[in-house]
Every structure is written in structure tokens, then in C-alpha cells.
């Protein structure tokens, strides 16, 4: 039994969605690249202008699609390109965490973090840590659901 | 009249030069930016954090650097210097020498293959102040602008010995050119801006400071050590044994404020105290267990809320300030520590102290290239190494402007204001030839793309040499993408950013009739605009494009996992395809800007701004509450530390009155302001007549309401009987010599009711420092000695706080004539009446004893506060004030004269108490910033904005509440409900003011707001497509 579990853990490649704000954390991710700080290839970054653009519903939607982990990265407090954006994000995501608990999604599947444009190393470390955490947690209980490339015109 | 040139030469690409260049192009002038180093960015690029906001320095600078690089009207000459300046005012001929990089600037892709292979390693890096090494072919730092490599000709094997040349072989773009020669370029310009910045002398010259020890660093070296992209990746370790230090000493005034050694600077470098406090805070944030000691003789924190920053470092971060002058550092070979010998000023004896690391705040001075330039234009410096104010004025008459650290020791905030001020002054002088050399791009008519049209997507997957192709299997990706719906064409190529690829993209769009495009290559932060412009050139709306980052965030960070990286690239393209098919064409919105400006406050700042704008040809409305223009400056008998005289101010006021485009509204106040950037409607009331004037429209608003000095009610029991013998500094300055009561002994008390600390507590004590009292006190001493040369003058002070170049000298020369007496707490100063004199009793810190004496005249340095009505005005303008009631600027460092709300600007004392000279600089800056908006008569609003769907909006107003730019307004409307029409409220976005952060979207509880280019549908689609794609039956057309 133990053997099988170990094998499964090794094979499990989590799907992780990361929201990055354009000015700080996305730039930090770019710097990690320029400096060649390696991290696991499980994350897919979605760029938004400000972390406050991330509606809590997106996180819920990700989990309901069977995504194993969601990470929202904004700027450090006070660094925001739009002045108070990250403070709004902090507030909203605190509420969301409670909601996730109620729904029964493990707390550690969703992290909120700050990375500045000069923190390439920290970005890669964060991703390593988060991926490791998700791997420990194992696959999401919600089955993966594939999307359609439908085109809406409205 | 001689021919004016419509172009400007900016020498120096630091923050002052960058700000001046960007402002100048927006004011309609061509800019040649010459920088001696291989990259622009200057000192600020090397900093880790900036004070007092503790923001990441590069984060806020890098976007400006990229703006300069992309700007079509800035010709950037890096690694170049000015060889010759000839000609006359308005028409200079400049010879610039461009040093050979041996790498073709237009071809190099910045991939770094050459640097990896270069056999010459271990050259000390200039950017990291010798703490890190680089190769012979190198890029100064990862975000360099231009992002191009260069070969160091002193170390290159090929250039010196004709062997190696391996970099030329590995460069896939063929960018290496060993045959490059220095190039001479001739430029014709109408004005010159000198912004050569500062340099820090290496501490090696201070042999007594153990300069060879690896644990003694200069403050700039330490800054690199703290930086996340520095030599240790932001870890604070000792460079010799790589262990964490337990204690760090910051030593102030190393080689500055020193009149005894000829190699040292006599002046104060102005920023070191704040810089060291900032560095110590960053250390504490890394590891609170590291003890930080700051050895200082006096803390000089000159600037907005800087004093509070120092106090914060002291109490919140537990950084210890030691009042002592360090004379020598020795290495203790037994334990590897550093032994500091210093004079403890408070105790009056020499002591020693051991620490692990020492950081020297060594003197900053103008660069050597600055002095070479001054020789070329035939001006000399004073003994401090700076230009005299009168020479600066003379140079400005010749259209040569000196700015930034080369003008005066100052911080980034002033450098930015000065950069903008230079642009405004040049704009005034060259306004007849505006827009003559500005390049405008002409684009073909847009191909109509209807929302119903089926998406036809083209995809280009970039190999970026081997950067992407070496890890990701690009042909596999192409194969995968070709199977996805709506993808009409996909291909791979070597360098998507090269100019031939741009032609390829255009051809593909036409050939396959594409209406969406994806490039999978590097980061949108640097390259998105390039591709968007290409789309524009072929007539496709630039917002039908998306750049997928498969280099910086994929191949570079997954170098050992090629298969997974390939899958990631496929996933990312699939997700972004989901977004791209839902993109809609966006139009750039143009907002009309009235060519007129409202200036509130007719003091020296207001007059300066009005004068500048009026000369540039704009309508100006100058509103002041008083019956006379000139503000507080005209009340003064003498003006201090500035080269402008009262007569010149009066002359300017007369000039203003005679101008037809200037409307001076005296005895008036603003009662109502409605509208947004470019279109404000203003109502002004005459206080005397109590009548409202005709409302008028303005495009921009400048706030210059100034400060005033308040009185103290400490010792109020005295002032009833002898009020004419107790004066504030402002009162003394504005009293004529003959009206001052006779005195034999006078006392100036500084820091009355301000600079709150542990000894001076209480609600009536302001937390901040009013910045100028110490300097004013020196001038007042001169004034008092002028009246009565035999008088004895006491100055009771806590810490002298002047960083004005001349103040330091004046303070020294006055030392023989007056007594400077240090006290700790204002509560300890007891004053009583004694036979018509004041009897003062206080504890003297230097002597450590209580002193008592009688004095005739009391001069008090009470706090400066914003003028009355500031709060009301802030409400009218819908802008913020800080806790002290001063107006709050958009960013303490890079936008010191802008408000967060666009179209409103700030200058002078309304921002913070400051010298008249600084107020004038800010006023010019504010005038220039507002002229930028007015000069074209229209501005382009941000395209990526939010939109409110009217039917869904319930008018709760939560979005308007959180919008940081006041870009959402609520309006009343009626709704028919059965038989009744009821009044309801709805929100709408002011597109001109929206910056597109999208913060309001998540706040809206009914989902009535959406964002262009990052819409709900687009982001949801990306989330849905992450796990995979379910392929329905679809047809490719």
C-alpha cells in the first residue's frame, strides 16, 4: 500500500494557476527567468494589471475545474502601482479563505503572496515551496474538467 | 532673430535626465540623450530600496527607462560622451563621440549566449561596485536599457591579442563586430540640460578606515549587497567567511563636512542620514537579530516626513543611534571583527567598539565628466565643487540648465522635480519652435473587425536563438497549436522581435486574412508594444494581440525539464488562445484639454508657475485670497539662499498684470470645482464683494497655497506682558530692523513644538520637522548682529538640520560670534520674567550642567503648517492630504509634484515647508507637467479601462468609494416603475481618468463592471482551458 502511494506521489504533477500583477510580481517572475532561477514547471501564470482585479470567483472557478492549487501574487504593501490595490486584494482573499474552508477545500491549496519586481529569487523559492505543498496534499478531490474553446460574441 | 533649434541635448541618463527627456518630448521637442555609461538609469538603478517609502527602486524606475527606450523622439546615445559644445543661445552645435561597443546595437537580442561562453571571467563589475564579477562581454545589469551587450576592450582577448573571438561564433544573430570604431556625431540643439548626477568616492582613500577589509563597505556597495539581484542575492553575509554578521555599524559623514582635509568635502551630502537609516531598516527586515548602530554627529533628515522616518527606525526597528564621530577603524585579527575608535560626543571621551561589518556613508560629489563639461562651457565652480547660484542663472539665460545632483546635493524627489522644471523652462524659451522635429507615425486605416466575425488567429512561436528552442521542442508546440480551433496559421521562427519578423507578421496577416495574432516568445513587459505597433502598421487593431511568455517564465526557468517545459508552452498558448478569440478591438479615446490653467495661491510658487505658463501661451487664472500677489516672500525683508531679489519678484508681478492671457483674481477663493482632467469648471468667489464671478473652464489646476508659521502657547504667560519681545522666526524676518526692540542679549530657540521624540512628547508637539528653521535661524543671527554687533546671541538647538550648501559655511563662520547650545527637551527650558528681561534656565547637553541667564529677545522656531482653508480645498479638488494636513502627492519619489488625480499639480509650501528656491523649482515643474497636458489640446486616455453596464448597476457607490483616481462618478437618473418615475443613482466611469487597475470589478456585488482586454469572459476562459481542451466539432474556415 505504502509503495503504491509513494509511486503515485512521484507521478502526480499538479496543475497550478498563478495570478500575477503586471507591475511587481509578473516582473519578479521575469527576473527569475533572466537570472535563471529554476522552479518546477507546474505553474501557469495569468497576467492581470493589478492583483485587485482577481475576483474571488476566479479562485473558486479554478478549484471547480479540478485545478490543484491557486496562487495570487501581488506587490508588497505600499508598492502598488495603483496605490492601494493589494490592500483590497488582501481583504477580499481573507474572506475567500473562510469560504474555501466551508466548502471543504484544504487551506493550503490557496495562497496569497507578495513579490516585488526585484525578487526573482524569492519568486522561484515561493513556487518551489507552493508546488511542494500541493504535491504533499495530493491531487484535488474534484475531477479535472476540460474547457471548450467556445467563442462568444457579445 | 537667430534660428532656434527645436531639439534639446540632455547629458546624463539618471533619473533627472530621464524625467527631463520624457517631459521634453511630451512638450514637443526632440531629445538627444547622451549617457557615458553603457546603460541609462544612473544611481537609482543600483539602489535596492528608496526612502521614505521603502519601495523597490528598480520597480518604479524600470518602466521609465523602457519609456525612454521606446520613445521615438528620444535619440539615445549610451556609452557616449560630449566632445565639444559650440554655438550660441538657441542654436548649439554639439559633437558627441560614441564609443565602440563591438556589438551591433540594433541587432543584439540580449540573449547572453556570448557572455556564457566568454573565457575571460572575474572582471569586477562596475554596476555592483566591484562586489560581483562579470565577463569581458557583458551587460551591466539584467534590466539595462538598451538591453544590449558590449565588449570591454581592455580585457577582450580578440581585441588585444587577436585570439579567441568565440563570442562572434556563438552569436546566432551575428551581432558581434570587432571592427567598430568610435563614431563622431554632430547634433544641433536649442538647449542643453546637464544632469550628470553623483559619484561616490571609493572608501579606499580612507586608509584609517580599514578600507581593504572585505567587511568595510561603502554605502553603495552595501546597497548592492542588500539588493535581490546583487552579489549575494539579497542575503546579508560577510563577504570573507560568508557568515551572517551580528552587528553592523553605519558610519556617517565619511569624507564630508570636513574642513581639515583637502581631499574631503566641506559640504553635507544631504542624503546619507536617510540612506543609512533606510539600509538599517532593510537589514532589520531581513533579520531582526542583527544589531544596527548608526554613528553620527547630527541627523539630517531634510524632506517630507523624513524626520518621522528616522524616529521610526529608532523605535520600531530598534536601530541604535550613537552620537559620535568615528576617526578610525582597525581590524581585530584575533576575532575577525572591526574595532571602531570614536569620540562619544555626549560623554566627551574617546571609546572603542567592536562590530562585524562597517558601512561608510562616504561623501557624494558631482562626477568627473561634469567638470569636463563645465570646462567646455567656460564656467568655474566655487570651493565646494558646485556652481554658484548666479552662474546657474547666467547659464540658464544661455539655455544651459544644470539639474539633479550636479546642481546641488539632493535626493531623488528633488531630482525629479528639477528634471520637470528644466523641461518647463526650456518649453518657455523654445515655445515658438515646438513640434517642429517631433515624429508622428502615420498608420493605415484599420481593418474592420466585427465582434461577430469568426476569429482567425495566427500564431508565431519564437525560438529566440537557443533560448527557447534549446529547451522547448518548438516544432512539437507548432504541431499542437495547429490542431487547436480558430488557429489558421502557425509557424516558428528564429527571432520574432527582429525587424524582418515584423514584416513576416504583416505578410501573414494579409495573406491569411487574420484578425487575431499571438506571438509566443519573451515578456510582454518589454516586447508587447513592439508587436502592437506592427499590428498597427498593417491596419489591425493592436488590442487583437497577445504575447505568450515562454522564455522568461518557461524555458529559462525549466532548463532541466525540456518535456515538461514543452507541455507548459502548449498549455499557455492554449489558455491565451482562449483569451485572444474573445478580444475586441479597442479605440483610443481622445479627451479634449482646455488650454488654460487655474493656479490657486499667488505666492512665489504661484507667480512662477503663472509666468511660465503665460509665456508658453496658455490662459492662466491666478486666484489668491489676499489683496496683493507675492505671498509670504514679499513680507520678508530679505530673501535667503536664493539668487532672486524682491525687485525681480515685483517685476514679475508687473509683467503678469500686463499680460492679456493672465487673469488675476485677488481677494478671491475657489468655491466650486467640477469635472475631470482637461475639463474643469471653476467657480470663484470674491470675498470682499461677496460676489461670485463668472464660472470659467480650465484644463489643469496647480495648487500653490503655501505654508504659515503658527504661534506657540507654551510660555503664553509671558507673551501677554511682553509680546513684542517674543517673535516667531517669520515675524522677525518680516520686521524692519528699526522696529525690533532694543536688545543686548537675544535667544533663538529651535524645534519649538516640533520633531516629537522620546524627550519631547505631547500632543501639542508636531511629529515632523519644518525643514528650514535652522537655516532661517542663521540668517536671523546675521540680521540681529547687523542691528547690534555687540549683542550676545544664544542658539538653543537640538540638532542642526541644514543641508543647503551655503548654510554649512555660514554656520561655521558664525561660530565665533554666537553660542550654539544644545538641549534635549523643550520642557526643560524654563522661562520667567525678571526685571523686564527673560530669565532662561535649561540643561546644557554639551556641558552636562544646568545653565541660567537673562535675555532680552526671544525668537522661536515654531512649526510650519498648511495655510487656512487647505482642508476645504482638498475636498473641492477631491485630493488627499497627509496626517499633518499637507497635500499628498502621487508618489513621494517619482511623482512629487503630481496628484494621484490627473490634471492637478502641486508645488511650494502646500507640499511641505521648503526654501523659496525649492518652491520655485517645484513651481516650474508643476507648470511643465500641466503644460504637457495642454500643449496638444487633447490627450489619449488609457485604452485598458473599466466599463459599467448601466442596466446592472444598482448605484451603491462602492466602486466610486475605492477608486484611487476618482474615475467613477455617481449620477442621478430617473427610472419608470409602473406609474411612477423614481429617482435612482447610477455609476459611470470617466474614461479620461480611469487607469485600468480593475480594482472596482471585484468590489461590485452585482457584477456590473468589466474591463477591456482583461474581461471576465477572457479570464474565465483561461481558467477553464488550463486543465485541457475538450474538442467539439468545429470547422476551420
Image (cartoon, grey):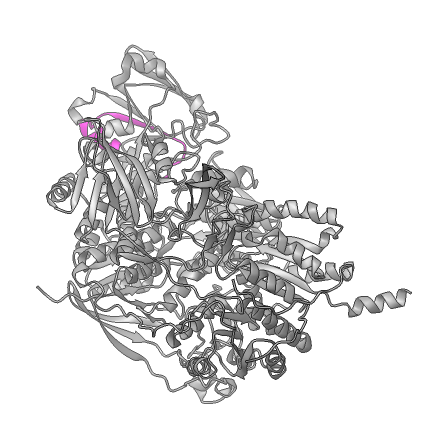
Q: What stretch is highlighted in magenta?
A: B780-801
| Occupied quadrant, residue B630 | top left
Please check the rendered image and state whether residue B790 is part of the magenta-colored stretch, yes or no. Answer: yes
Give the side of residue B589 with respect to residue B430, left or right. Answer: right
**Is residue B116 found left or right of B43 in the rendered image?**
right
Q: Is residue A12 visible?
A: yes
Above or below B884: residue A154: below
Q: Is residue B266 above or below residue B1013?
A: above
Viewer-proximal residue among B1027 and B568: B1027
Residue B851, percent from left and from top: 40, 21
Q: Nearer the viewer, residue B238 or B1013?
A: B1013
Can you name the residue that lies furthest to the left here?
Answer: B1
Residue B377 image position (x, y, % from top left): 20, 64
| Quadrant hosting residue B262 | bottom left
Q: Which residue is drawn at 30% across and 45% down?
A: B680
Q: How many labels does the image show?
A: 0
Q: Where is residue B1029 in the image (x, y as percent from the top left)?
A: 66, 71
Q: Which residue is drawn at 28% across and 60% down?
A: B24
Was residue B843 drawn as part of the magenta stretch in this picture? no
Determine if residue B385 is in view: no
- Which of these two is toward me, B645 or B976? B976
State left or right for residue B720 relative to residue B511. left
Q: Seen from this angle, which residue lies furthest right?
A: A1
Query: Quadrant of the image for the N terminus of chain B?
Result: bottom left
Amino acid at each position: 500500500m505504502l509503495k503504491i502511494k509513494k509511486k503515485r506521489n512521484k507521478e502526480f504533477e499538479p496543475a497550478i494557476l498563478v495570478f500575477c500583477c503586471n507591475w511587481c510580481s509578473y516582473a519578479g517572475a521575469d527576473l527569475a527567468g533572466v537570472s535563471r532561477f529554476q522552479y518546477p514547471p507546474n505553474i501557469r501564470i495569468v497576467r492581470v494589471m493589478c492583483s485587485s482585479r482577481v475576483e474571488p470567483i476566479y479562485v473558486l472557478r479554478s478549484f471547480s475545474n479540478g485545478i490543484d492549487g491557486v496562487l495570487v501574487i501581488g506587490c508588497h504593501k505600499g508598492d502598488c502601482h495603483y496605490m492601494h490595490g493589494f490592500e483590497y486584494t488582501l481583504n477580499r482573499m481573507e474572506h475567500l479563505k473562510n469560504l474555501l474552508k466551508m466548502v471543504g477545500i484544504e487551506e493550503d491549496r490557496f495562497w496569497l503572496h507578495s513579490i516585488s519586481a526585484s525578487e526573482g529569487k524569492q519568486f522561484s523559492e515561493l513556487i518551489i515551496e507552493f508546488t511542494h505543498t500541493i504535491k504533499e496534499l495530493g491531487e484535488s478531490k474534484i475531477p479535472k474538467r476540460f474547457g471548450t474553446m467556445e467563442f462568444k460574441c457579445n | 532673430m537667430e534660428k532656434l533649434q527645436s531639439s534639446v541635448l540632455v547629458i546624463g541618463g539618471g533619473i533627472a535626465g530621464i524625467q527631463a527627456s520624457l517631459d521634453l518630448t511630451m512638450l514637443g521637442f526632440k531629445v538627444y540623450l547622451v549617457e557615458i555609461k553603457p546603460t541609462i538609469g544612473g544611481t537609482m538603478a543600483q539602489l535596492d530600496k528608496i526612502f521614505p517609502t521603502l519601495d523597490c527602486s528598480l520597480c518604479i524606475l524600470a518602466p521609465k527607462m523602457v519609456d525612454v527606450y521606446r520613445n521615438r523622439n528620444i535619440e539615445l546615445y549610451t556609452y557616449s560622451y560630449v566632445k565639444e559644445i559650440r554655438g550660441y543661445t538657441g542654436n548649439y552645435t554639439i559633437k558627441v563621440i560614441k564609443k565602440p561597443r563591438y556589438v551591433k546595437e540594433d541587432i543584439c537580442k540580449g540573449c547572453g549566449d556570448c557572455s556564457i561562453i566568454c573565457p575571460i571571467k572575474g572582471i569586477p563589475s562596475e554596476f555592483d561596485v566591484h562586489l560581483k564579477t562579470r565577463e569581458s562581454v557583458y551587460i551591466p545589469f539584467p534590466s539595462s536599457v538598451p538591453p544590449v551587450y558590449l565588449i570591454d576592450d581592455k580585457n577582450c582577448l580578440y581585441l588585444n591579442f587577436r585570439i579567441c573571438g568565440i563570442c562572434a561564433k556563438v552569436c546566432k544573430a551575428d551581432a558581434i563586430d570587432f571592427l567598430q570604431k568610435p563614431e563622431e556625431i554632430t547634433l544641433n540643439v536649442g538647449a542643453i540640460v546637464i544632469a550628470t548626477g553623483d559619484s561616490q568616492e571609493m572608501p579606499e582613500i580612507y586608509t584609517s578606515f580599514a578600507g581593504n577589509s572585505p567587511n568595510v563597505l561603502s554605502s553603495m556597495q552595501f546597497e548592492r549587497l542588500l539588493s535581490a539581484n546583487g552579489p549575494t542575492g539579497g542575503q546579508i553575509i560577510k563577504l570573507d567567511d560568508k557568515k551572517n554578521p551580528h552587528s553592523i555599524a553605519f558610519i556617517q559623514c565619511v569624507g564630508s563636512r570636513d574642513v581639515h582635509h583637502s581631499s574631503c568635502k566641506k559640504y553635507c551630502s544631504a542624503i546619507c542620514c536617510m540612506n543609512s537609516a533606510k539600509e538599517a531598516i532593510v537589514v532589520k527586515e531581513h533579520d531582526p537579530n542583527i544589531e544596527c548602530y548608526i554613528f553620527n554627529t547630527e541627523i539630517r533628515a531634510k524632506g517630507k516626513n523624513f524626520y518621522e522616518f528616522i524616529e521610526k527606525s529608532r523605535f520600531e526597528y530598534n536601530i541604535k543611534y550613537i552620537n559620535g564621530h568615528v576617526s578610525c577603524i582597525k581590524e581585530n585579527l584575533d576575532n575577525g571583527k572591526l574595532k571602531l575608535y570614536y569620540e562619544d560626543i555626549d560623554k566627551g571621551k574617546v571609546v572603542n567598539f567592536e562590530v562585524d561589518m562597517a558601512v561608510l556613508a562616504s561623501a557624494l560629489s558631482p562626477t568627473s565628466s561634469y567638470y569636463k563639461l563645465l570646462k567646455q562651457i567656460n564656467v568655474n565652480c566655487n570651493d565646494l565643487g558646485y556652481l554658484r547660484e548666479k552662474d546657474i542663472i547666467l547659464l540658464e539665460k544661455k539655455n544651459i540648465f544644470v539639474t539633479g545632483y550636479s546642481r546641488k546635493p539632493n535626493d531623488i524627489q528633488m531630482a525629479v522635480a528639477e528634471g520637470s522644471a528644466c523641461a518647463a523652462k526650456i518649453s518657455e524659451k523654445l515655445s515658438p519652435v515646438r513640434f517642429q522635429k517631433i515624429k508622428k507615425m502615420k498608420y493605415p486605416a484599420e481593418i474592420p473587425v466585427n465582434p461577430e466575425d469568426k476569429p482567425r488567429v495566427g500564431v508565431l512561436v519564437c525560438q529566440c536563438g537557443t533560448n527557447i528552442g534549446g529547451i522547448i521542442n518548438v516544432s512539437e508546440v507548432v504541431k499542437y497549436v495547429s490542431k487547436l480551433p480558430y488557429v489558421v496559421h502557425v509557424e516558428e521562427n528564429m527571432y520574432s522581435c527582429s525587424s524582418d519578423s515584423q514584416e513576416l507578421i504583416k505578410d501573414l496577416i494579409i495573406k491569411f486574412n487574420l484578425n487575431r495574432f499571438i506571438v509566443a516568445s519573451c515578456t510582454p513587459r518589454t516586447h508587447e508594444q513592439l508587436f502592437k505597433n506592427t499590428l498597427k502598421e498593417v491596419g489591425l487593431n493592436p488590442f487583437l494581440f497577445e504575447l505568450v511568455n515562454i522564455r522568461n517564465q518557461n524555458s529559462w526557468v525549466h532548463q532541466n525539464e525540456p518535456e515538461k517545459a514543452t507541455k507548459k508552452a502548449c498549455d499557455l498558448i492554449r489558455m491565451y488562445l482562449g483569451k485572444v478569440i474573445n478580444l475586441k478591438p479597442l479605440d483610443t479615446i481622445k479627451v479634449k484639454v482646455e488650454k488654460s490653467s487655474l493656479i490657486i495661491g499667488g505666492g512665489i510658487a504661484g507667480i512662477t508657475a503663472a509666468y511660465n505658463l503665460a509665456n508658453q501661451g496658455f490662459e492662466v487664472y491666478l486666484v489668491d485670497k489676499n489683496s496683493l500677489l507675492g505671498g509670504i516672500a514679499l513680507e520678508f525683508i530679505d530673501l535667503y539662499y536664493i539668487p532672486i531679489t524682491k525687485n525681480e519678484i515685483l517685476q514679475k508681478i508687473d509683467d503678469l498684470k500686463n499680460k492679456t492671457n493672465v487673469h488675476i483674481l485677488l481677494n478671491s477663493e475657489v468655491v466650486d470645482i467640477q469635472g475631470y482632467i482637461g475639463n474643469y469648471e471653476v467657480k470663484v468667489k470674491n470675498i470682499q464683494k461677496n460676489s461670485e464671478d463668472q464660472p470659467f473652464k480650465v484644463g489643469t489646476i496647480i495648487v500653490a497655497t503655501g505654508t504659515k508659521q503658527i504661534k506657540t502657547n507654551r510660555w503664553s504667560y509671558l507673551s501677554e506682558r511682553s509680546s513684542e519681545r517674543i517673535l516667531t522666526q517669520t515675524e522677525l524676518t518680516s520686521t524692519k530692523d528699526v522696529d525690533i526692540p532694543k536688545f543686548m542679549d537675544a535667544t533663538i530657540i529651535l524645534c519649538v513644538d516640533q520633531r516629537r521624540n522620546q524627550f519631547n512628547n505631547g500632543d501639542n508637539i508636531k511629529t515632523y520637522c519644518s525643514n528650514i528653521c535652522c537655516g532661517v535661524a542663521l540668517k536671523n543671527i546675521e540680521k540681529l548682529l547687523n542691528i547690534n554687533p555687540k549683542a550676545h546671541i544664544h542658539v538653543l538647538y537640538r540638532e542642526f538640520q541644514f543641508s543647503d550648501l551655503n548654510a554649512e559655511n555660514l554656520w561655521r563662520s558664525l561660530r565665533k560670534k554666537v553660542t550654539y547650545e544644545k538641549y534635549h527637551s523643550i520642557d526643560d527650558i524654563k522661562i520667567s520674567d525678571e526685571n523686564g528681561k527673560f530669565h532662561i534656565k535649561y540643561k546644557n547637553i554639551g556641558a552636562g550642567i544646568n545653565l541660567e541667564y537673562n535675555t532680552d529677545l526671544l525668537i522661536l522656531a515654531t512649526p510650519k503648517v498648511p495655510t487656512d482653508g487647505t482642508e476645504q480645498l482638498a475636498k473641492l479638488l477631491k485630493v488627499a492630504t497627509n496626517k499633518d494636513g499637507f497635500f499628498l502627492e502621487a508618489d513621494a519619489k517619482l511623482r512629487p509634484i503630481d496628484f494621484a488625480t490627473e490634471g492637478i499639480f502641486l508645488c511650494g509650501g502646500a507640499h511641505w515647508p521648503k526654501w523659496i528656491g525649492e518652491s520655485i523649482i517645484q513651481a516650474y515643474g508643476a507648470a511643465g507637467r500641466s503644460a504637457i497636458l495642454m500643449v496638444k489640446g487633447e490627450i489619449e486616455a488609457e485604452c485598458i479601462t473599466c466599463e459599467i453596464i448601466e442596466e446592472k448597476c444598482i448605484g451603491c457607490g462602492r466602486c466610486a468609494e475605492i477608486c484611487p483616481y476618482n474615475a467613477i462618478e455617481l449620477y442621478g437618473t430617473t427610472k419608470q416603475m409602473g406609474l411612477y418615475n423614481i429617482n435612482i443613482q447610477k455609476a459611470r466611469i470617466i474614461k479620461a481618468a480611469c487607469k485600468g487597475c480593475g480594482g472596482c470589478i471585484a468590489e461590485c456585488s452585482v457584477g456590473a463592471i468589466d474591463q477591456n482586454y482583461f474581461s471576465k469572459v477572457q479570464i474565465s476562459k483561461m481558467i477553464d482551458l488550463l486543465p485541457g481542451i475538450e474538442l467539439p466539432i468545429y470547422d476551420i474556415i
